[in-house]
Amino acid sequence: MRDRQDRPGVAARRPLLELVLPVLRDAIINRTLPPGERLSEGDICARLGISRTPLREALRILEIEGLVTMAAGVGAMVTPISPPDLHDRFELLAGLEAIAAARVAGRRDPATIRQILAIQRDMESASRQGSQEDYYRANDRFHQTIVEAAGNEVVLNAHRTAMWHVYRIRHATNAATPLKPDAARHHEHIIAAVIAGDVDGAFVAMRRHLEDVSDLILGRLAAGWFDAIDRDAPPP
């Protein structure tokens, strides 16, 4: 018996799934599909030129990732942003990245250290110039480099999924939040601990950094920032 992946129908659907999944995920992250929006299968299929089968497979994956919710009688909808859920995801993210930072500090790999120092310089340059796009691109590379250098595939995969929820929130606030010239300084303690091979110090520094980010984002959520942004109004 042939493996299911070898069957023509499955093989034909796989490329479509791989096309539609990132399109929908990106639309949710950048809020083209805003929180709470109902996802009409007919409209999406017509817009993307696909059948319902790969779309439903994509929606099931997005449901597992927490970006889509399936409701009886309603169907698929973009998962609303919930402070308790966001808190839990930041808590997970802090733990994952703290573990990764500790592993990287323990290894003290010269190539990894050179890489994160170069990225830090890019962040410093972007923050001085006030370029949010360049800063957050470099910031993402900084964190991703540390997670990848840790060499733990389970941490890497869990981190990737958690970050999609962070991107969704961050995208909503970037335009309304001026970038501070010293924004890149947040990573200095992490870098110092990694260079020194201080495993405990790297763990604590990374965890504190992400706890600070969590407190900032959740504070803005409580203050009504995201409701205002969705109405195209200035944040409170």
Image (tube, rainbow, N blue to C red):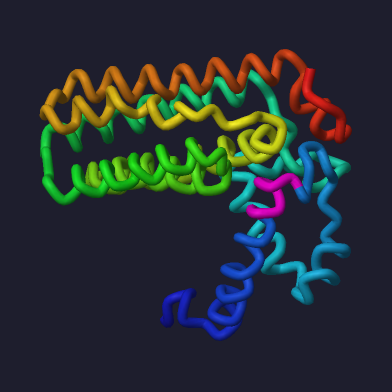
In the image, residue 176 above or below residue 159: above
Residue at 34% across, 32% down: 97
Confirm whether residue 158 shows in the render: no
Q: State the extent of the magenta-drawn residues as a range.
A: 25-31
Dominant SS of magenta comes to helix
Question: Which sits in the foreground, 4 or 131?
Answer: 131
> Would you identify the image quadrant in which residue 10 lies?
bottom right
In the rendered view, does 49 fall on the left or right side of 87?
Answer: right
Q: Position of residue 161 (x, y in %)?
A: 50, 43
Question: Which sits in the foreground, 28 or 141?
Answer: 141
Question: Which sits in the foreground, 48 or 12?
Answer: 48
In the image, residue 34 above or below residue 111: above
Number of callouts: 0
Confirm whether residue 98 shows in the render: yes
Q: Position of residue 80 (x, y in %)?
A: 74, 33
Q: Residue furthest front?
A: 129
> Would you identify the image quadrant in which residue 210 lies?
top left
Residue at 56% across, 85% down: 8
In the rendered view, does 54 fall on the left or right side of 72?
Answer: left
In the image, residue 206 above or below residue 5: above
Q: Position of residue 95 (x, y in %)?
A: 36, 25
Residue at 21% across, 19% down: 201
Q: Position of residue 110 (x, y in %)?
A: 12, 46
Residue 29 sits inside the magenta stretch? yes
From the image, which quarter does the C terminus lie in?
top right
In the rendered view, does 154 fall on the left or right side of 220?
Answer: left
Residue 86 sits inside the magenta stretch? no
From the image, which quarter does the N terminus lie in?
bottom left
> Would you identify the image quadrant in which residue 36 lies?
top right
Residue at 37% across, 40% down: 143
